[in-house]
Amino acid sequence: MEYLIWTGALISVAGIAGLVWCIVYVMKLRKAGLDETAMRARMQKAVMINFAALAVSTLGLMMVVVGVFLA
């Protein structure tokens, strides 16, 4: 079950990288000084990627927990 633990850890890191990307993306958007409609349209993209990254990270953590229990 060691492969399950390491695979889950890699998936979790990928999810965390997605969350960091969202933070950087939104910080750049705020500095861009866009009008409200353009900001909303771009923020919707960031929110969807944020939810997906959070789900990927959660899936990876669940794999780690299952791997630890089965080891």
Image (cartoon, rainbow, N blue to C red):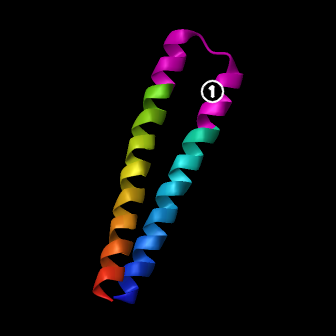
- Residue that badge 1 annotates: 29
Q: Secondary structure at mark 1?
A: helix
Where residue 15 appears, as percent x and y from the top left, is: 47, 56
Is residue 39 inside the magenta stretch? yes
Where residue 61 appears, as percent x and y from the top left, is: 39, 65
For disc 1, the neighbor class at 10 Å (few under 14, some 14 to 19, many from 20) is some
Residue sitting at x 48%, y 71%: 10
Above-or-below relation of 10 to 56: below
Where residue 24 appears, as percent x and y from the top left, is: 64, 40
- The type of residue carrying mark 1 is Leu
Residue sitting at x 34%, y 61%: 59
Q: Which is more toward the observer, 5 or 70? A: 70
Above-or-below relation of 6 to 16: below
Q: Give the quarter of the figure containing the N terminus.
A: bottom left
**Which residues fall within the magenta stretch?**
25-42
Q: Which is more toward the observer, 56 or 62? A: 62
Is residue 50 inside the magenta stretch? no
Q: Quadrant of residue 51?
A: top left
Secondary structure mostly seen in magenta is helix
